[in-house]
Structure formats: structure tokens, C-alpha cells
């Protein structure tokens, strides 16, 4: 006999949101399939259909089958069968839809604001019930999307068909970039299983120049950043650099506060995240989401900031160590 | 095979991206190449292929299995698709134009000041322990259109057509960057966030064994977080100056 909390748990779970997302992808697939103006309609439809299958059944399917479906998506995209160019006149110069009825005033903000409000609300509720707030925010984002759609339809008196056509337009303008973050996460897992991380850590140790504190701090931060540039993820780099370089070469010999050295090492990795296309969800997807002409435009903007921040990481870590010695 | 060959995947990625080959294909090729060079089996858990060398190897997870597992585990990165119909609908009914109109009424608003404000807002969310996919939830529907509105006001223009495409692209990049800056450095200011927990877990692990507290890690995240806000403010204010110069040229 399922209890009320069991039902609520299943309804407000990440899996439920994955199913909703998969259903939206199937609608996008169907709209692509029916769009005779799109030369890639079959390839695109199949691509979004398969991604929808992965979203809905990803927790149930054997991993080899999911992997094979991912390779199918990559093959479709590799063959140039995925994509859709907006027809002339559909969007303005900045890539926005041509507005139909801009007379709603500030009320048009209400449905869109429902998304962060629900994400925030779910995070709070999850915390109250002892759950994981990050998970709560993600579940809230999912239900926020649905609530925003309902509120938007009511407010604009538009049709669901119109909403999904617009959603598909945004989705198609990003195209295969959408699966890049997940694909890169998989690459990171394969790199780790293959020992690529350990190899890079060995390389960093090999370039460590002598035992002077300043140069060790430089090598530590540089190693962390380079590692992150390659893996696209400072969280994957941190344990390797911390156990291989930071603790044995800096924290132990100099008697440094491990909490201080460790968090500064971690954020030195974040400067790498700002500069690498491997962190696609932060750097490449937003460029696609904003219809930028240069897919590396976000990275180029961030590089001067990241370089200055990297230097500051070295200086701050060195100063804090010197002051405490 | 020498260990160093395992870096073939890294090389494939670097060369592939430099040549602007299709990114999905490059990443998949890099994964398959690295795994095979490291001696991982191609696939596991398929009874029909049992005992075939290279393809399978008993007790080891296959490359394709890893690919599928990690891809499914990371669906949360792509969850924002669910918000696209709502955002698309609101955009069709004038969301971006209204954002621009709204910000033009705030007389003191410039692109740089707006992006500084948004970054501070994201830092605040980090302190509250909330992680959000800010690019789809805030940047595309609200922050970028508002930044564009501020630029239009500055250019004395009523529409986006007056702003050169290159500058529009830079404003887009700045909007995305302010999200990343605020998110990356703000998230370490709360003990419930993943980065802090990772540092805590790594330092307290048996092999290392330092008994640090979560709050001490958060405490030492403050200097860098404060510097990130300052450095970004300088960059965004310089960006304002650059835009003013460019927009007065094109007027």
C-alpha cells in the first residue's frame, strides 16, 4: 500500500522531471518530423526522439543500451543530419522571436519568474524535510517550467501548440550542443577510468620546481588549472591535485592550514573552468542559448577575468601561508 | 603500450576543436580512443559477446556502458529543456522587449552596472545554498534583454537595430559571464554546496586525515569570493566604457 509520502516522493522526484523533459523532447521530435520546410527533418526528429527515450528510460535501461543510443545521436549529428535554420524573418537581429503582441506590460514577467521562484521554493521545502537542496532546486526548475507554461498560456491566451513551436525554435537553434555537457561528463568518467587524471598529476609533480614555497604554490595552482582545462571540471581535478601535490608538497612540509590551502586550490580550478570549452554547460551551451555567432564568445570574454583571478589565487595563497608561518 | 599514449584522447579533443570539427563526434572519438588504449573493454554485460577479446573483458565496465551510465547520471545538466516552451511563449508575447523597456526606465542603468548587480544576486543565491541553472532561468529571458535595453538607452536608440552585431555578441557574452562569475565563487560561501563538501570530504578522507570543519573551509572561501566581485566589477565598468565609445561612434 503506497503511503502519501511515497507518492509525493515519486511525484516530486528528479525521475519525474526527467520524464516530463523527455515528453517535451518527443513533442519537439514530432514537430520536427512534420516540418516539411526542414531539410533535416528526419535526422532531427530521430535525434530528439532518442534523447527523449534516454531521458524517460535512462534510469531503467541497461547502461550499454543508453551508451549505444548516445553513439547513435553522435552519428546522426556527425553526419550533419541534425539541425534547423530559422527561416528569414522569424527572428530579429539579436535572435529573438518577433513579438506578436507586446501589450502585456510587466505582467509578461510573471510566468518566467515562476521558474526561479519554484526552484527556490522546492529547494527550501527539500531542506525542511531533510533532503538535498540542489536536487530540490532541480526538481523545482522542472515543475517551474510546467507551471510557467500553464501561467503563460493563461496570461497570453496563446495555444500549447504555439508554446511548443516556440520551445522547439529555441531547442533547434541550440541543436546538438544540448547533449554536449552530458557527453563531456561521460568523457570525464572514461578519462578517470583510464587513468588520464593520474597521468596529469604525475606530470604536474614532475614540473614542480624545487621546494621554494612561492614556486610550489604556483605549480599547485597551475596544475589545478591545467587539469581543469583538460577535464572541464574542477571537481574531478581537485582530489587528484590535493592528494598528489597540495598535501604532500605544501600542507605537510610547511604546516599550512589545510582548509585554507584546499579551498583556494579548488577555486584556482574554477579559473580554468572559465577558459575551457570542455566546460560546455557553462561556456558553450550559453553561447548557443543566446544565439551567439561565436561559440567561443563567452570564453573569450572570461579569459582576462580568469587570468587576473588566477594570479590573485597564487598571491592570496602565498600571502596567507607566509602570514601564518 | 606506454602510459603517455593515454593522452591521445586529450590530443584528439584539442586538435578536433581547433579544426572546428563537429564537437559531439570529437568528444565521442576521444572517449573511445582513450578507453581502448587504456585496455578497457568496448562493452560489458552483453551475454552474446562474452569471451570476445577487446570487445569484452570479464569484470571490467565497458566504455559504452560508462558512456551510457554517465550520460544518464548527468541528465540534470540538460533539464532546462523543460523550461523552453514557457520561455519561448513569453518571448513571443514580448518578454525581451518588455525587459528592455523596463530597464530603460531605470535611468542609472548601464550594461556594466546591471551585470555587477546580477553577479551580486548570484553570489547571494550561493550564500543561501541554492544552485540554479542560471543561464536558461535568468540570463536568456531576463538579464541579456535588460542589458540590451540598457545599451539601447545609452545609444539613444529605440531598437536593437542601432547596435552593431559585434557589440550585441559582446553583451551576450558579458551576461553569460556574470552568471558564471557569481555562480562559481558565490557557491563556496555556503557549507551545503558541493564544492565545500568535496574539499571537506577529501581532507577528512582516511588517506589524508585532516579534521577540518565545513565552516573553516567556507571562511577561507571569502577572500577569493570578494576579489572575484571586485575584479568582475572592474571588467564590467571597463566594458561600459568600451560600449559607450563604440555606441557613440555608430550613432
Image: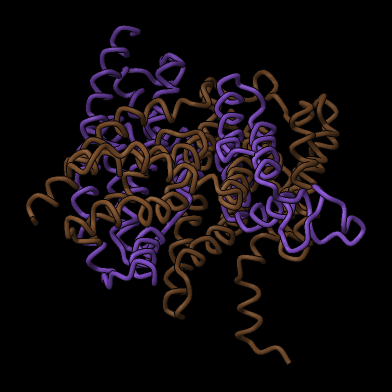
Q: The N terminus of chain A is located in which quarter? A: bottom right
- Give the residue drawn at x 86%, y 59%: B46
Residue at the (19%, 61%) spot, across then down: A257
- Residue A169 visible in the snapshot: no
Q: Position of residue B67 (x, y in %)?
A: 69, 50
Q: Is residue A235 left or right of residue A21?
A: left
- Residue B197 in picture, x, y percent from top left: 38, 65
Q: Which corner quadrant holds the C terminus of chain A? A: bottom left
Is B224 located above or below residue B44 in the figure?
A: above
Residue B103 occupies quadrant: top left
Could you tell me which residue is drawn at 36 percent across and 18 percent down?
A: B157
Considering only vertical position in the picture, is A65 above or below A283? below
Apparent side of residue B34 relative to residue B107 in the rendered image (left or right): right
Task: Work out whether residue A55 can be spotted.
Answer: yes
In the displayed structure image, the side of residue A194 where residue A44 appears, left or right? right
- A73 or B145: nearer the viewer: A73
Q: Position of residue A100 (x, y in %)?
A: 60, 33
Q: From the image, state the color of chain A.
A: brown
In the image, farthest residue toward the front: B1
Q: In this image, B68 relative to A296: left or right?
A: right
In the image, which lettered chain appears purple? Answer: B
Amino acid at each position: 500500500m503506497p503511503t502519501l509520502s511515497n507518492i509525493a516522493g515519486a511525484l516530486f522526484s528528479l525521475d519525474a522531471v526527467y520524464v516530463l523533459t523527455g515528453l517535451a523532447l518527443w513533442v519537439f521530435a514530432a514537430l520536427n518530423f512534420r516540418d516539411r520546410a526542414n531539410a533535416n527533418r528526419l535526422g532531427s526528429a530521430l535525434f530528439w526522439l532518442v534523447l527523449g527515450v534516454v531521458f524517460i528510460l535512462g534510469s531503467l535501461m541497461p547502461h550499454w543500451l543508453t551508451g549505444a543510443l548516445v553513439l547513435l545521436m553522435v552519428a546522426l549529428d556527425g553526419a550533419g543530419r541534425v539541425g534547423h535554420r530559422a527561416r528569414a524573418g522569424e527572428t530579429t537581429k539579436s535572435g529573438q522571436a518577433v513579438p506578436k503582441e507586446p501589450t502585456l506590460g510587466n505582467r509578461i514577467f510573471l510566468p518566467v519568474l515562476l521558474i526561479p521562484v519554484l526552484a527556490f521554493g522546492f529547494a527550501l521545502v527539500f531542506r525542511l524535510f531533510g533532503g538535498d537542496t540542489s536536487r530540490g532546486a532541480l526538481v523545482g526548475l522542472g515543475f517551474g517550467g510546467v507551471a510557467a507554461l500553464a501561467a503563460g498560456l493563461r496570461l497570453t491566451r496563446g495555444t500549447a501548440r504555439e508554446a511548443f513551436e516556440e520551445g522547439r525554435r529555441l531547442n533547434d537553434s541550440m541543436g546538438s550542443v544540448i547533449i554536449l555537457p552530458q557527453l563531456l561528463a561521460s568523457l570525464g568518467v572514461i578519462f578517470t577510468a583510464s587513468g588520464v587524471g593520474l597521468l596529469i598529476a604525475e606530470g604536474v609533480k614532475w614540473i614542480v620546481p624545487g621546494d621554494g614555497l612561492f614556486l610550489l604554490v604556483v605549480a599547485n595552482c597551475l596544475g589545478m588549472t591545467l587539469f581543469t582545462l583538460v577535464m572541464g571540471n574542477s571537481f574531478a581535478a581537485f582530489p587528484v591535485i590535493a592528494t598528489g601535490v597540495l598535501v604532500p608538497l605544501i600542507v605537510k612540509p610547511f604546516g599550512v592550514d589545510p582548509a585554507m590551502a584546499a579551498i583556494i586550490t579548488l577555486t584556482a580550478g574554477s579559473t580554468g573552468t572559465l577558459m575551457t570549452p570542455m566546460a560546455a554547460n557553462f561556456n558553450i551551451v550559453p553561447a548557443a542559448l543566446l544565439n551567439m555567432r561565436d561559440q567561443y564568445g563567452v570564453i573569450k570574454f572570461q579569459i582576462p577575468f580568469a587570468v587576473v583571478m588566477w594570479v590573485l589565487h597564487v598571491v592570496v595563497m602565498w600571502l596567507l601561508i607566509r602570514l601564518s608561518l | 603500450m606506454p602510459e603517455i599514449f593515454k593522452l591521445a584522447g586529450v590530443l584528439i579533443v584539442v586538435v578536433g576543436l581547433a579544426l572546428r570539427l563537429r564537437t559531439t563526434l570529437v568528444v565521442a572519438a576521444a572517449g573511445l580512443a582513450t578507453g581502448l588504449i587504456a585496455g578497457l573493454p568496448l562493452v560489458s554485460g552483453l551475454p552474446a559477446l562474452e569471451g570476445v577479446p577487446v570487445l569484452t573483458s570479464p569484470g571490467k565496465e565497458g566504455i559504452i556502458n560508462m558512456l551510457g551510465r554517465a550520460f544518464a547520471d548527468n541528465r540534470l545538466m540538460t533539464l532546462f529543456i523543460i523550461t523552453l516552451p514557457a520561455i519561448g511563449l513569453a518571448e513571443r508575447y514580448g518578454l525581451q522587449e518588455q525587459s528592455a523597456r523596463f530597464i530603460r526606465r531605470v535611468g542609472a542603468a548601464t550594461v556594466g552596472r546591471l551585470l555587477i548587480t546580477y553577479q551580486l544576486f548570484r553570489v547571494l543565491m550561493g550564500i543561501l545554498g541554492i544552485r540554479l541553472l542560471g543561464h536558461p532561468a535568468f540570463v536568456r529571458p531576463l538579464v541579456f534583454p535588460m542589458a540590451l535595453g540598457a545599451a539601447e538607452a545609452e545609444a539613444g536608440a529605440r531598437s536593437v537595430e542601432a547596435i552593431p552585431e559585434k557589440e550585441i555578441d559582446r553583451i551576450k557574452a558579458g551576461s553569460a559571464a556574470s552568471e558564471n562569475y557569481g555562480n562559481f565563487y558565490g557557491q563556496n560561501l555556503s557549507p551545503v554546496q558541493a564544492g565545500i563538501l568535496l574539499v571537506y570530504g577529501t581532507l577528512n578522507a582516511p588517506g589524508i586525515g585532516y579534521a577540518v570543519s565545513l565552516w573553516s573551509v567556507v571562511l577561507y572561501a571569502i577572500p577569493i569570493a570578494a576579489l572575484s566581485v571586485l575584479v568582475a566589477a572592474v571588467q564590467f565598468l571597463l566594458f561600459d566604457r568600451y560600449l559607450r565609445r563604440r555606441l557613440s561612434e555608430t550613432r
